[in-house]
Amino acid sequence: MKSTYLLQRFSKILNFNNLFHTVVVKQVFFILILFFLANTTLFGQELTSYGVTGRGGVATTFATDYQAIGVNPANLAIRKSFRDPKITFGFLEGNIGFYTENVTFSQILKSYFPKAFNNGNNYQLTYAEKQKAAKDLPNASLSTTINATLFGMHISSEKLGGFAFSIRDRLDFYSKTNSTLSEILFLGQNASYFTNLLLSNGQTISNSQDLSQDIRDQVVFGFRPESESQTYGEVMNNSTIQMLWTREYNFAYGKKIVDSYNVQVFAGLGVRYISGITLIDLESQNNVFIGETIALSPSFPIEGFDIPSPTNVGYQPKNGFARFALPKPIGNGYGIDLGLNIVIKRNLYLGASLINYGKMSWTGNVYNITDGILAQTQGTGFDNYNFIAYSPETFQLGGEGSALSWEGSEKFDDELPAMLRVGGSYEFFKTAHLGFDVVVPLNIDAPGSLASNLYAIGGDLRINKLLTISSGLSTGGNQDFNLNIPFGLTYHARRGHYEAGFSTQDISSFIGDIEGGGNNISFALGFLRFKF
Protein backbone atom coordinates (compact mmCIF):
# COMPACT_ATOMS: atom_id res chain seq x y z
CA MET A 1 0.00 0.00 0.00
CA LYS A 2 1.07 3.57 -0.60
CA SER A 3 2.67 5.25 2.40
CA THR A 4 0.71 8.29 3.47
CA TYR A 5 0.92 10.93 6.17
CA LEU A 6 -1.59 11.00 9.05
CA LEU A 7 -3.67 13.91 10.05
CA GLN A 8 -3.32 16.21 7.07
CA ARG A 9 -6.67 14.76 6.05
CA PHE A 10 -7.76 13.61 9.52
CA SER A 11 -7.42 17.24 10.53
CA LYS A 12 -9.84 18.12 7.75
CA ILE A 13 -12.27 15.47 8.90
CA LEU A 14 -12.08 15.90 12.64
CA ASN A 15 -12.25 19.71 12.45
CA PHE A 16 -8.54 20.01 12.90
CA ASN A 17 -8.04 21.74 9.57
CA ASN A 18 -10.08 22.83 6.60
CA LEU A 19 -13.03 20.44 6.56
CA PHE A 20 -14.41 20.82 10.03
CA HIS A 21 -13.08 24.35 10.30
CA THR A 22 -14.72 25.43 7.07
CA VAL A 23 -17.87 23.35 7.11
CA VAL A 24 -18.67 23.12 10.79
CA VAL A 25 -16.90 25.80 12.76
CA LYS A 26 -17.79 28.64 10.44
CA GLN A 27 -21.29 27.22 10.46
CA VAL A 28 -21.39 27.31 14.23
CA PHE A 29 -19.93 30.80 14.18
CA PHE A 30 -22.57 31.96 11.69
CA ILE A 31 -25.44 30.59 13.72
CA LEU A 32 -24.04 32.03 16.93
CA ILE A 33 -23.72 35.45 15.35
CA LEU A 34 -27.15 35.10 13.80
CA PHE A 35 -28.61 34.16 17.16
CA PHE A 36 -26.99 36.70 19.42
CA LEU A 37 -27.35 39.63 17.02
CA ALA A 38 -30.91 38.85 15.95
CA ASN A 39 -32.14 37.23 19.20
CA THR A 40 -32.49 33.46 19.18
CA THR A 41 -32.41 30.10 20.91
CA LEU A 42 -29.81 27.52 21.07
CA PHE A 43 -29.01 22.01 21.34
CA GLY A 44 -29.60 18.95 19.53
CA GLN A 45 -31.91 16.57 18.02
CA GLU A 46 -33.74 15.71 21.22
CA LEU A 47 -33.92 19.38 22.33
CA THR A 48 -35.77 21.72 20.00
CA SER A 49 -36.59 24.90 21.95
CA TYR A 50 -35.71 26.77 25.11
CA GLY A 51 -38.69 25.19 26.91
CA VAL A 52 -37.64 21.67 25.96
CA THR A 53 -34.01 22.42 26.85
CA GLY A 54 -35.03 23.76 30.26
CA ARG A 55 -36.80 20.48 31.02
CA GLY A 56 -33.85 18.37 29.83
CA GLY A 57 -35.74 16.94 26.86
CA VAL A 58 -39.21 16.40 28.35
CA ALA A 59 -41.45 17.45 25.47
CA THR A 60 -43.71 14.71 24.09
CA THR A 61 -46.74 15.99 26.00
CA PHE A 62 -45.45 19.55 26.59
CA ALA A 63 -44.39 21.08 23.25
CA THR A 64 -46.99 23.34 21.65
CA ASP A 65 -47.54 25.37 18.44
CA TYR A 66 -44.78 25.10 15.81
CA GLN A 67 -42.33 23.98 18.52
CA ALA A 68 -44.17 20.63 18.43
CA ILE A 69 -42.73 19.98 14.96
CA GLY A 70 -40.12 17.27 15.33
CA VAL A 71 -41.52 16.35 18.75
CA ASN A 72 -45.20 15.38 18.55
CA PRO A 73 -47.45 16.81 15.81
CA ALA A 74 -50.57 15.71 17.73
CA ASN A 75 -49.97 18.60 20.13
CA LEU A 76 -50.78 21.09 17.36
CA ALA A 77 -54.48 20.49 17.94
CA ILE A 78 -54.51 20.88 21.72
CA ARG A 79 -56.34 23.96 23.03
CA LYS A 80 -56.59 24.13 26.82
CA SER A 81 -58.68 27.29 26.89
CA PHE A 82 -60.57 29.65 24.62
CA ARG A 83 -57.90 32.18 25.55
CA ASP A 84 -55.20 30.12 23.84
CA PRO A 85 -53.71 31.99 20.86
CA LYS A 86 -55.03 31.22 17.40
CA ILE A 87 -51.83 32.32 15.67
CA THR A 88 -48.26 31.93 16.91
CA PHE A 89 -45.15 32.79 14.96
CA GLY A 90 -41.48 33.25 15.71
CA PHE A 91 -38.08 33.89 14.20
CA LEU A 92 -34.57 32.64 14.81
CA GLU A 93 -35.13 30.05 17.51
CA GLY A 94 -32.90 27.11 18.12
CA ASN A 95 -30.35 25.63 20.48
CA ILE A 96 -26.67 24.85 20.67
CA GLY A 97 -24.74 22.55 22.96
CA PHE A 98 -21.32 21.06 23.47
CA TYR A 99 -20.58 17.96 25.50
CA THR A 100 -17.44 15.99 26.22
CA GLU A 101 -16.27 13.77 29.04
CA ASN A 102 -13.27 14.43 31.27
CA VAL A 103 -12.88 18.05 30.17
CA THR A 104 -14.02 20.83 32.47
CA PHE A 105 -16.01 23.91 31.56
CA SER A 106 -13.05 26.06 32.62
CA GLN A 107 -10.64 24.17 30.32
CA ILE A 108 -12.96 24.63 27.36
CA LEU A 109 -13.37 28.36 27.97
CA LYS A 110 -9.63 28.88 28.39
CA SER A 111 -8.89 26.88 25.24
CA TYR A 112 -11.36 28.68 23.00
CA PHE A 113 -11.38 32.15 24.60
CA PRO A 114 -7.94 32.69 26.21
CA LYS A 115 -8.16 36.48 26.07
CA ALA A 116 -11.29 36.51 28.19
CA PHE A 117 -10.73 33.52 30.48
CA ASN A 118 -6.94 33.06 30.69
CA ASN A 119 -5.79 36.62 31.35
CA GLY A 120 -5.06 37.17 27.68
CA ASN A 121 -2.45 34.40 27.57
CA ASN A 122 -2.57 31.32 25.35
CA TYR A 123 -3.75 28.29 27.26
CA GLN A 124 -1.21 25.52 26.70
CA LEU A 125 -1.05 22.09 28.25
CA THR A 126 2.30 20.80 29.43
CA TYR A 127 3.56 17.59 27.88
CA ALA A 128 2.47 15.70 31.00
CA GLU A 129 -1.00 17.25 30.76
CA LYS A 130 -1.18 16.31 27.08
CA GLN A 131 -0.30 12.74 28.02
CA LYS A 132 -3.11 12.78 30.57
CA ALA A 133 -5.55 14.20 28.01
CA ALA A 134 -4.60 11.46 25.57
CA LYS A 135 -5.42 8.89 28.26
CA ASP A 136 -8.65 10.57 29.36
CA LEU A 137 -10.34 11.01 25.97
CA PRO A 138 -10.27 7.47 24.48
CA ASN A 139 -13.80 6.07 24.16
CA ALA A 140 -15.20 9.35 25.48
CA SER A 141 -18.10 10.92 23.63
CA LEU A 142 -17.80 14.38 22.12
CA SER A 143 -20.84 15.99 20.60
CA THR A 144 -21.88 19.36 19.24
CA THR A 145 -25.47 20.00 18.22
CA ILE A 146 -27.23 22.97 16.67
CA ASN A 147 -30.93 23.29 15.95
CA ALA A 148 -31.96 26.61 14.43
CA THR A 149 -35.56 27.39 13.57
CA LEU A 150 -35.31 30.27 11.13
CA PHE A 151 -39.06 30.77 11.00
CA GLY A 152 -42.08 29.01 12.46
CA MET A 153 -45.83 29.57 12.39
CA HIS A 154 -48.86 27.83 13.90
CA ILE A 155 -52.56 28.38 13.21
CA SER A 156 -55.02 26.80 15.64
CA SER A 157 -58.74 26.17 15.13
CA GLU A 158 -61.08 24.34 17.48
CA LYS A 159 -62.95 22.79 14.54
CA LEU A 160 -60.23 22.33 11.93
CA GLY A 161 -57.27 21.49 14.16
CA GLY A 162 -53.77 22.92 14.14
CA PHE A 163 -51.50 23.67 11.18
CA ALA A 164 -47.80 24.46 11.46
CA PHE A 165 -44.90 25.32 9.20
CA SER A 166 -41.21 25.88 9.92
CA ILE A 167 -37.82 26.21 8.27
CA ARG A 168 -35.09 24.71 10.37
CA ASP A 169 -31.37 23.97 10.15
CA ARG A 170 -29.91 20.96 11.95
CA LEU A 171 -26.23 20.36 12.53
CA ASP A 172 -25.08 17.38 14.58
CA PHE A 173 -21.46 16.36 15.19
CA TYR A 174 -20.45 13.28 17.18
CA SER A 175 -17.13 11.54 17.68
CA LYS A 176 -15.59 8.85 19.83
CA THR A 177 -11.91 7.92 19.31
CA ASN A 178 -9.78 5.02 20.42
CA SER A 179 -6.57 5.29 22.45
CA THR A 180 -4.22 5.24 19.44
CA LEU A 181 -6.00 8.03 17.61
CA SER A 182 -6.41 10.11 20.79
CA GLU A 183 -2.69 9.83 21.54
CA ILE A 184 -1.74 10.88 18.01
CA LEU A 185 -4.03 13.89 18.20
CA PHE A 186 -2.47 15.18 21.43
CA LEU A 187 1.13 13.94 21.15
CA GLY A 188 1.52 14.05 17.39
CA GLN A 189 4.96 12.83 16.29
CA ASN A 190 5.76 11.78 19.87
CA ALA A 191 2.88 9.28 20.06
CA SER A 192 3.99 5.77 20.95
CA TYR A 193 2.59 4.54 17.61
CA PHE A 194 5.67 6.06 15.95
CA THR A 195 8.54 3.82 17.02
CA ASN A 196 11.29 6.06 15.63
CA LEU A 197 11.98 9.78 15.98
CA LEU A 198 14.08 12.08 13.80
CA LEU A 199 15.80 14.87 15.74
CA SER A 200 16.73 18.33 14.51
CA ASN A 201 20.44 17.36 14.43
CA GLY A 202 19.70 14.57 11.94
CA GLN A 203 19.97 11.77 14.50
CA THR A 204 17.36 8.98 14.55
CA ILE A 205 16.42 7.49 17.92
CA SER A 206 13.89 5.02 19.25
CA ASN A 207 10.73 6.47 20.78
CA SER A 208 10.57 5.84 24.52
CA GLN A 209 8.44 7.13 27.36
CA ASP A 210 11.65 7.90 29.28
CA LEU A 211 12.83 10.59 26.87
CA SER A 212 13.49 13.94 28.52
CA GLN A 213 11.63 17.09 27.57
CA ASP A 214 14.83 18.48 26.02
CA ILE A 215 14.91 15.52 23.61
CA ARG A 216 11.17 15.87 22.90
CA ASP A 217 11.71 19.50 21.95
CA GLN A 218 14.23 18.40 19.28
CA VAL A 219 11.91 15.92 17.57
CA VAL A 220 10.92 16.99 14.06
CA PHE A 221 9.47 13.75 12.68
CA GLY A 222 7.89 10.53 13.91
CA PHE A 223 7.77 7.38 11.79
CA ARG A 224 7.66 3.60 11.78
CA PRO A 225 8.65 1.02 9.13
CA GLU A 226 6.03 0.56 6.43
CA SER A 227 6.09 -3.19 7.07
CA GLU A 228 4.91 -2.52 10.61
CA SER A 229 2.49 0.30 9.80
CA GLN A 230 -1.25 -0.11 10.22
CA THR A 231 -4.00 0.79 7.83
CA TYR A 232 -6.19 3.73 8.71
CA GLY A 233 -9.01 1.32 9.39
CA GLU A 234 -6.79 -0.24 12.04
CA VAL A 235 -5.59 3.08 13.43
CA MET A 236 -9.18 4.29 13.66
CA ASN A 237 -10.66 0.98 14.88
CA ASN A 238 -13.69 1.40 17.16
CA SER A 239 -13.74 5.13 16.38
CA THR A 240 -16.61 7.18 15.00
CA ILE A 241 -16.71 10.62 13.41
CA GLN A 242 -20.09 11.76 12.14
CA MET A 243 -21.54 15.08 11.09
CA LEU A 244 -24.82 15.96 9.41
CA TRP A 245 -25.99 19.40 8.31
CA THR A 246 -29.42 19.69 6.73
CA ARG A 247 -32.10 22.32 6.15
CA GLU A 248 -35.71 21.23 6.67
CA TYR A 249 -38.98 22.61 5.32
CA ASN A 250 -41.62 21.25 7.71
CA PHE A 251 -45.40 20.98 7.41
CA ALA A 252 -47.46 19.45 10.21
CA TYR A 253 -51.11 19.01 11.12
CA GLY A 254 -52.86 17.90 14.31
CA LYS A 255 -56.53 17.02 14.89
CA LYS A 256 -58.73 16.01 17.81
CA ILE A 257 -60.15 12.59 16.90
CA VAL A 258 -61.91 11.67 20.16
CA ASP A 259 -63.71 14.17 22.35
CA SER A 260 -65.55 13.14 25.51
CA TYR A 261 -65.79 14.57 29.00
CA ASN A 262 -63.09 12.32 30.47
CA VAL A 263 -60.93 11.44 27.47
CA GLN A 264 -59.62 13.40 24.51
CA VAL A 265 -57.40 11.89 21.83
CA PHE A 266 -55.26 13.96 19.48
CA ALA A 267 -53.38 12.67 16.43
CA GLY A 268 -50.88 14.39 14.17
CA LEU A 269 -48.86 14.01 11.00
CA GLY A 270 -45.74 15.89 9.94
CA VAL A 271 -43.84 15.83 6.66
CA ARG A 272 -40.59 17.51 5.75
CA TYR A 273 -38.51 18.12 2.67
CA ILE A 274 -34.82 18.05 3.48
CA SER A 275 -31.91 19.72 1.70
CA GLY A 276 -28.58 18.08 2.47
CA ILE A 277 -25.63 20.42 2.86
CA THR A 278 -22.84 18.34 4.40
CA LEU A 279 -22.35 14.71 5.41
CA ILE A 280 -19.46 13.03 7.22
CA ASP A 281 -19.89 9.35 8.02
CA LEU A 282 -16.63 7.75 9.11
CA GLU A 283 -16.57 4.71 11.34
CA SER A 284 -14.20 1.78 11.70
CA GLN A 285 -15.11 -1.51 13.35
CA ASN A 286 -13.01 -4.69 13.38
CA ASN A 287 -10.24 -2.73 11.62
CA VAL A 288 -12.43 -2.01 8.60
CA PHE A 289 -14.29 1.16 7.65
CA ILE A 290 -18.03 0.58 7.83
CA GLY A 291 -18.69 4.28 7.32
CA GLU A 292 -16.49 5.81 4.66
CA THR A 293 -18.45 8.57 2.97
CA ILE A 294 -18.37 12.33 2.90
CA ALA A 295 -20.37 14.80 0.79
CA LEU A 296 -19.48 18.49 0.61
CA SER A 297 -21.55 21.47 -0.47
CA PRO A 298 -20.15 23.47 -3.41
CA SER A 299 -20.53 26.58 -1.25
CA PHE A 300 -17.58 25.41 0.88
CA PRO A 301 -14.57 24.55 -1.32
CA ILE A 302 -12.15 22.16 0.37
CA GLU A 303 -8.58 21.81 -0.85
CA GLY A 304 -7.86 18.32 -2.11
CA PHE A 305 -11.41 17.35 -3.07
CA ASP A 306 -11.24 18.30 -6.74
CA ILE A 307 -10.59 14.72 -7.79
CA PRO A 308 -12.78 13.16 -10.50
CA SER A 309 -16.11 11.83 -9.32
CA PRO A 310 -19.34 10.81 -11.07
CA THR A 311 -21.12 13.09 -8.57
CA ASN A 312 -18.71 16.01 -8.90
CA VAL A 313 -20.63 19.29 -9.20
CA GLY A 314 -17.58 21.47 -8.65
CA TYR A 315 -17.21 24.20 -6.08
CA GLN A 316 -18.96 27.53 -6.26
CA PRO A 317 -17.94 29.44 -3.14
CA LYS A 318 -20.23 32.22 -2.02
CA ASN A 319 -19.12 35.26 -0.14
CA GLY A 320 -20.02 36.46 3.33
CA PHE A 321 -23.49 35.91 4.71
CA ALA A 322 -24.81 34.22 1.54
CA ARG A 323 -22.66 31.11 1.90
CA PHE A 324 -24.30 30.32 5.23
CA ALA A 325 -27.80 31.63 4.61
CA LEU A 326 -28.11 30.08 1.14
CA PRO A 327 -25.65 27.18 0.87
CA LYS A 328 -26.01 25.07 -2.24
CA PRO A 329 -27.42 21.64 -1.32
CA ILE A 330 -25.86 18.40 -2.55
CA GLY A 331 -28.58 16.05 -1.36
CA ASN A 332 -32.29 15.80 -0.72
CA GLY A 333 -34.73 13.62 1.15
CA TYR A 334 -37.96 13.39 3.06
CA GLY A 335 -39.05 12.67 6.61
CA ILE A 336 -42.32 11.78 8.29
CA ASP A 337 -43.54 12.35 11.87
CA LEU A 338 -46.51 10.59 13.47
CA GLY A 339 -47.88 11.51 16.89
CA LEU A 340 -50.55 10.70 19.45
CA ASN A 341 -51.55 12.45 22.67
CA ILE A 342 -54.25 11.16 25.03
CA VAL A 343 -55.65 13.55 27.64
CA ILE A 344 -57.48 11.98 30.58
CA LYS A 345 -59.72 14.16 32.75
CA ARG A 346 -57.98 17.23 31.35
CA ASN A 347 -54.93 16.80 33.57
CA LEU A 348 -53.17 13.55 32.68
CA TYR A 349 -51.32 13.44 29.34
CA LEU A 350 -49.95 10.31 27.66
CA GLY A 351 -48.09 10.74 24.39
CA ALA A 352 -46.01 8.89 21.83
CA SER A 353 -44.50 9.84 18.49
CA LEU A 354 -42.37 8.46 15.67
CA ILE A 355 -40.06 11.22 14.49
CA ASN A 356 -37.90 11.70 11.41
CA TYR A 357 -38.62 8.45 9.59
CA GLY A 358 -37.29 8.70 6.04
CA LYS A 359 -34.18 8.75 3.88
CA MET A 360 -31.62 11.01 2.26
CA SER A 361 -29.93 10.78 -1.14
CA TRP A 362 -26.56 12.51 -1.45
CA THR A 363 -25.99 13.27 -5.11
CA GLY A 364 -23.20 15.86 -5.27
CA ASN A 365 -19.49 15.85 -4.39
CA VAL A 366 -19.65 12.39 -2.80
CA TYR A 367 -16.35 10.72 -1.92
CA ASN A 368 -15.28 7.47 -0.26
CA ILE A 369 -12.09 6.72 1.68
CA THR A 370 -9.54 4.51 -0.03
CA ASP A 371 -7.75 2.99 2.94
CA GLY A 372 -3.99 3.57 3.12
CA ILE A 373 -1.34 3.06 5.79
CA LEU A 374 -0.03 5.43 8.43
CA ALA A 375 3.76 5.43 8.39
CA GLN A 376 4.82 8.92 9.48
CA THR A 377 3.73 12.32 10.72
CA GLN A 378 5.12 15.65 11.79
CA GLY A 379 3.82 18.05 14.44
CA THR A 380 3.59 18.25 18.20
CA GLY A 381 -0.15 17.58 18.58
CA PHE A 382 -2.78 19.83 20.07
CA ASP A 383 -1.67 22.10 22.90
CA ASN A 384 -5.14 22.48 24.42
CA TYR A 385 -8.76 21.46 23.88
CA ASN A 386 -9.36 23.85 21.01
CA PHE A 387 -9.58 21.26 18.26
CA ILE A 388 -10.55 23.97 15.80
CA ALA A 389 -7.23 25.80 15.82
CA TYR A 390 -4.71 24.36 13.41
CA SER A 391 -1.13 25.45 12.83
CA PRO A 392 1.97 24.02 11.16
CA GLU A 393 3.43 23.39 14.60
CA THR A 394 0.42 21.28 15.51
CA PHE A 395 0.54 18.96 12.53
CA GLN A 396 3.19 19.90 9.99
CA LEU A 397 3.16 16.99 7.59
CA GLY A 398 6.26 16.64 5.41
CA GLY A 399 6.57 14.94 2.05
CA GLU A 400 4.02 14.42 -0.67
CA GLY A 401 0.68 12.69 -0.48
CA SER A 402 -2.16 12.89 1.99
CA ALA A 403 -3.05 11.01 5.12
CA LEU A 404 -6.16 9.56 3.57
CA SER A 405 -6.72 8.92 -0.10
CA TRP A 406 -10.15 9.53 -1.64
CA GLU A 407 -12.06 8.33 -4.64
CA GLY A 408 -15.19 9.66 -6.28
CA SER A 409 -18.44 7.85 -5.56
CA GLU A 410 -21.88 7.36 -7.04
CA LYS A 411 -24.81 8.88 -5.17
CA PHE A 412 -25.18 7.68 -1.60
CA ASP A 413 -28.50 6.83 0.07
CA ASP A 414 -28.79 6.89 3.84
CA GLU A 415 -31.59 6.56 6.36
CA LEU A 416 -32.52 9.48 8.57
CA PRO A 417 -31.83 9.30 12.32
CA ALA A 418 -35.37 8.30 13.25
CA MET A 419 -36.44 8.10 16.88
CA LEU A 420 -39.35 7.04 19.04
CA ARG A 421 -40.60 9.31 21.81
CA VAL A 422 -42.77 8.19 24.73
CA GLY A 423 -43.85 10.52 27.51
CA GLY A 424 -46.40 11.30 30.15
CA SER A 425 -47.23 14.26 32.37
CA TYR A 426 -49.71 15.63 34.88
CA GLU A 427 -50.85 19.24 35.16
CA PHE A 428 -51.72 20.66 38.58
CA PHE A 429 -54.24 23.54 38.47
CA LYS A 430 -52.48 25.09 35.45
CA THR A 431 -49.69 26.07 37.82
CA ALA A 432 -47.33 23.09 37.68
CA HIS A 433 -46.85 20.60 34.87
CA LEU A 434 -44.59 17.59 35.63
CA GLY A 435 -43.67 14.71 33.36
CA PHE A 436 -41.14 12.31 31.86
CA ASP A 437 -39.82 11.39 28.43
CA VAL A 438 -37.93 8.47 26.93
CA VAL A 439 -36.36 9.02 23.51
CA VAL A 440 -35.20 5.88 21.67
CA PRO A 441 -32.98 6.17 18.55
CA LEU A 442 -34.13 3.73 15.87
CA ASN A 443 -31.12 4.02 13.58
CA ILE A 444 -28.04 4.53 15.73
CA ASP A 445 -25.63 4.16 12.81
CA ALA A 446 -27.15 7.11 10.93
CA PRO A 447 -25.25 10.42 11.12
CA GLY A 448 -27.03 12.78 13.48
CA SER A 449 -28.54 9.99 15.58
CA LEU A 450 -28.50 9.83 19.34
CA ALA A 451 -25.90 7.34 20.53
CA SER A 452 -28.25 5.79 23.11
CA ASN A 453 -31.64 6.23 24.79
CA LEU A 454 -32.37 9.58 26.42
CA TYR A 455 -34.20 9.55 29.78
CA ALA A 456 -35.60 12.72 31.28
CA ILE A 457 -37.95 13.91 34.01
CA GLY A 458 -38.90 17.53 34.42
CA GLY A 459 -41.57 20.15 34.34
CA ASP A 460 -42.72 23.75 34.43
CA LEU A 461 -43.79 25.88 37.40
CA ARG A 462 -45.77 29.07 36.75
CA ILE A 463 -44.62 31.29 39.62
CA ASN A 464 -46.79 34.24 38.52
CA LYS A 465 -48.52 35.60 35.42
CA LEU A 466 -45.24 36.72 33.93
CA LEU A 467 -42.68 34.01 34.73
CA THR A 468 -42.38 30.24 34.38
CA ILE A 469 -39.37 28.27 35.57
CA SER A 470 -38.40 24.86 34.20
CA SER A 471 -36.06 22.18 35.50
CA GLY A 472 -35.58 18.43 35.87
CA LEU A 473 -33.01 15.67 35.40
CA SER A 474 -31.79 13.94 32.24
CA THR A 475 -29.25 11.33 31.21
CA GLY A 476 -28.26 9.32 28.16
CA GLY A 477 -28.47 10.42 24.54
CA ASN A 478 -25.05 11.49 23.24
CA GLN A 479 -23.71 11.81 26.76
CA ASP A 480 -23.60 8.22 27.98
CA PHE A 481 -24.97 8.36 31.53
CA ASN A 482 -23.80 11.78 32.58
CA LEU A 483 -26.48 13.34 34.82
CA ASN A 484 -27.72 16.77 33.75
CA ILE A 485 -29.65 19.34 35.75
CA PRO A 486 -31.49 21.61 33.29
CA PHE A 487 -32.89 25.02 34.10
CA GLY A 488 -35.00 27.47 32.14
CA LEU A 489 -36.86 30.73 32.59
CA THR A 490 -39.71 31.93 30.35
CA TYR A 491 -41.26 35.39 30.31
CA HIS A 492 -44.89 35.92 29.25
CA ALA A 493 -46.10 39.44 28.44
CA ARG A 494 -49.15 40.53 30.41
CA ARG A 495 -51.57 40.14 27.52
CA GLY A 496 -49.88 37.00 26.28
CA HIS A 497 -48.87 38.40 22.89
CA TYR A 498 -45.14 38.10 23.45
CA GLU A 499 -42.87 35.41 24.91
CA ALA A 500 -39.14 35.15 25.60
CA GLY A 501 -37.00 32.56 27.32
CA PHE A 502 -33.58 31.37 28.37
CA SER A 503 -32.43 27.89 29.40
CA THR A 504 -29.49 25.54 29.69
CA GLN A 505 -29.49 21.77 29.63
CA ASP A 506 -27.10 21.52 32.58
CA ILE A 507 -26.75 24.40 35.00
CA SER A 508 -24.21 22.46 37.07
CA SER A 509 -21.62 22.93 34.30
CA PHE A 510 -21.70 26.66 35.00
CA ILE A 511 -21.34 26.16 38.75
CA GLY A 512 -18.73 23.43 39.08
CA ASP A 513 -17.51 20.09 37.85
CA ILE A 514 -19.46 16.96 38.65
CA GLU A 515 -17.13 14.32 40.00
CA GLY A 516 -16.71 11.48 37.53
CA GLY A 517 -18.91 13.07 34.89
CA GLY A 518 -18.56 15.07 31.73
CA ASN A 519 -19.49 18.62 30.99
CA ASN A 520 -22.53 19.67 29.04
CA ILE A 521 -22.38 23.29 27.93
CA SER A 522 -25.59 24.52 26.33
CA PHE A 523 -27.47 27.74 25.85
CA ALA A 524 -31.02 28.54 24.82
CA LEU A 525 -32.16 32.07 24.16
CA GLY A 526 -35.36 33.18 22.48
CA PHE A 527 -36.86 36.64 22.13
CA LEU A 528 -38.92 36.67 18.94
CA ARG A 529 -42.10 34.71 19.67
CA PHE A 530 -45.48 36.37 19.17
CA LYS A 531 -49.00 35.12 19.91
CA PHE A 532 -52.42 36.46 18.91
Image (spheres, rainbow, N blue to C red):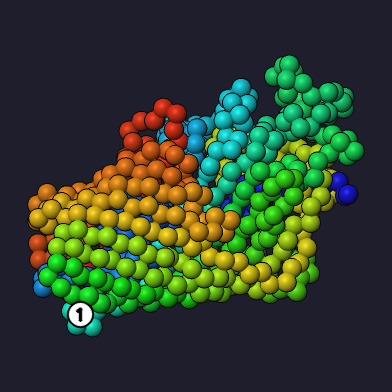
Q: Amino acid at mark 1?
A: Ser
**Observer-nearest of 281 and 452:** 452
Q: Please tell me whether mark 1 sits on a helix, a strand or a loop.
A: strand
Residue sitting at x 57%, y 35%: 137
Q: Quadrant of residue 490?
A: bottom left
Vertical placement of 203 versus 426: above or below?
above
| Mark 1 Cα-neighbour bin, 10 Å: few <14, some 14–19, many ≥20 | some
* Direction from residue 476 to residue 233 in the image, left or right: right
Residue 524 image offset from top left, x and y in percent: 33, 52
* Direction from residue 44 to residue 372 in the image, left or right: right
**Observer-nearest of 296 and 353:** 353
* Direction from residue 152 to residue 243 in the image, left or right: right
Residue sitting at x 46%, y 67%: 356
Residue 275 image offset from top left, x and y in percent: 53, 72
Q: Classify the position of the C terminus by image quarter.
A: bottom left
Residue where numbered disc 1 is placed: 157
Q: Quadrant of residue 405?
A: bottom right
- Asked if residue 487 shows in the view, the reply is no
**Observer-nearest of 360 and 351:** 351
- Asked if residue 21 shows in the view, the reply is yes
Residue 343 image offset from top left, x and y in percent: 21, 64
Residue sitting at x 57%, y 47%: 175
Residue sitting at x 31%, y 73%: 267
